[in-house]
């Protein structure tokens, strides 16, 4: 259903709220055009949102759950899009309606963990588009939300300063990146001496052992490589008593998205081969000259190579640097290896606003009490 904005004082502008799959399909081409114009991550693409809907829509079976995509139109031309959805969220002593970016706010085992989220817009009309969306993000009555959560929000997003929400830095979500703008060899020379020495030793070990990086060239490669990645990842975690992150739904989502994205040149999926066996695999999505590394799987029982996962990263960096990639983004996650190899860090924002009704305040208070009790419980 398309809901026109009747409150706009500018007759050139109107807002439509897309709630049906057919509505999404109707804006496919202009959405794709806007996405290509800016430095927007894959999770802001039409393909991401459409694929998410196909895979996860059956999870949204409660009243008020579903698509809630905001679109701003100027003279009948799509000028901005904010891909959101409504979902019921259990907090404390009740359930509230959460409005957030598509692919966020799901159950933990089905989180897609997108990064660098924002509105997609024609930069010339960015301020006007944000002004059009403002009533929907400041007044819960327009869309029926109790909790508005826009995170992780890209630093510098125009939404942060205008949406009347509590905006904080999300340091836990810090994204670490490797600068390849002057080439792979220059990048190696920027590493700390001890790190640089061990890295060059690992690269020599790869060459001596005959390890080779293979990059998926077509959708058929994508399916085969991805299946190997999932198997390696799941086996590793199952050995230590965990299920791993690739539930059937998440595996289906990325497999389908990778097939189309690799065909369009918007994704990279590579595997490291040693003695005829895949010992590591990595995939991610391209954002112009930035590569966002979404997931890696490593065979930790590999013989003959000291650190196959790191080796796969390094060889893929070298490959991508030769093809114009200037930043290899390791995305969020705080670990020693990322801090050693990444020379820059981006701290995303977390924007949050609660509709202060008695029900919502009581629900959130219940969540606080439950957390306190859990922390007080004996280990």
Image (spheres, rainbow, N blue to C red):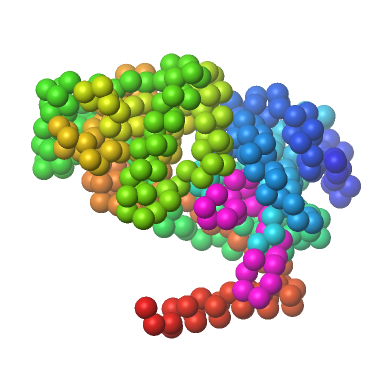
Instruction: Using residue 275 as the reference point, say whether residue 129 is left or right of it.
Output: right
Tell how many labels.
0
Can residue 187 be seen here? The reply is yes
Q: Is residue 245 above or below residue 185?
A: below
Name the residue at 35% across, 24% down: 320
Of 150 and 246, nearer the camera is: 246
Q: Residue furthest top?
A: 217
Is residue 98 rendered magenta in the image?
Answer: yes
Q: Which residues are magenta?
A: 90-110
Instruction: Using residue 178 as the reference point, say whether residue 105 is left or right of it.
Output: right
Instruction: Using residue 193 as the reference point, say whether residue 172 is left or right of it.
Output: right
Q: Position of residue 247 (x, y in %)?
A: 51, 45
Name the residue at 74% across, 48% down: 66
For residue 135, what is the image quadrant? bottom right
Q: Position of residue 363 (x, y in %)?
A: 66, 74
Is residue 275 rendered magenta in the image?
Answer: no
Q: Position of residue 188 (x, y in %)?
A: 20, 32
- Which corner quadrant holds the C terminus? bottom left
Q: Is residue 336 above or below residue 93?
A: above
Name the residue at 13% across, 28% down: 205
Q: Is residue 239 above or below residue 217?
A: below
Of 66 and 300, nearer the camera is: 300
Of 208 and 3, nearer the camera is: 208
Q: Is residue 186 above or below residue 144?
A: above
Can residue 181 be seen here? The reply is no
For residue 231, what is the image quadrant? top left
Q: Position of residue 336 (x, y in %)?
A: 25, 51
Name the residue at 30% across, 38% down: 298
- Which corner quadrant holds the N terminus? top right
């Amino acid at each position: 259903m398309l809901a026109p904005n009747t409150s706009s004082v500018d007759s050139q502008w109107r807002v439509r709220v897309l709630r049906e799959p057919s509505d999404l399909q109707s804006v496919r081409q202009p959405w794709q055009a806007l996405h290509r114009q800016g430095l927007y991550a894959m999770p802001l693409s039409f393909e991401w949102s459409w694929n998410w809907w196909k895979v996860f829509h059956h999870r949204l079976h409660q009243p008020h759950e579903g698509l809630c995509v905001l679109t701003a139109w100027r003279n009948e031309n799509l000028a901005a899009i904010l891909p959101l959805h409504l979902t019921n969220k259990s907090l404390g002593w009740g359930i509230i309606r959460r409005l957030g970016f598509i692919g966020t706010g799901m159950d933990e085992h089905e989180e897609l963990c997108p990064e660098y989220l924002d509105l997609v817009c024609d930069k010339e009309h960015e301020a006007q588009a944000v002004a059009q969306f403002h009533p929907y993000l400041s007044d819960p009555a327009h869309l029926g939300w109790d909790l508005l959560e826009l995170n992780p929000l890209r630093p510098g997003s125009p939404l942060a300063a205008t949406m009347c929400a509590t905006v904080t830095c999300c340091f836990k979500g810090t994204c670490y990146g490797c600068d390849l703008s002057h080439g792979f060899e220059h990048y190696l020379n920027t590493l700390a001496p001890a790190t640089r020495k061990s890295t060059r030793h690992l690269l020599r070990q790869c060459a001596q052992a005959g390890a080779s990086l293979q990059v998926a060239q077509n959708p058929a490669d994508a399916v085969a490589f991805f299946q190997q990645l999932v198997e390696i990842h799941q086996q590793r975690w199952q050995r230590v008593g965990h299920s791993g992150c690739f539930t059937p739904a998440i595996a289906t989502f990325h497999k389908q998205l990778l097939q189309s994205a690799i065909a369009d040149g918007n994704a990279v999926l590579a595997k490291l081969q040693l003695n005829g066996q895949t010992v590591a695999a990595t995939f991610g999505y391209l954002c112009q000259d930035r590569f966002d590394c979404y997931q890696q799987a490593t065979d930790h029982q590999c013989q003959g190579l000291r650190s196959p996962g790191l080796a796969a990263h390094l060889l893929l960096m070298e490959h991508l640097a030769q093809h114009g990639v200037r930043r290899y983004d390791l995305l969020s996650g705080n670990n020693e290896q990322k801090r050693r190899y990444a020379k820059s860090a981006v701290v995303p924002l977390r924007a949050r606003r609660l509709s202060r009704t008695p029900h919502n305040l009581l629900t959130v208070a219940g969540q606080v009490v439950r957390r306190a009790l859990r922390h007080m419980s004996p280990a």
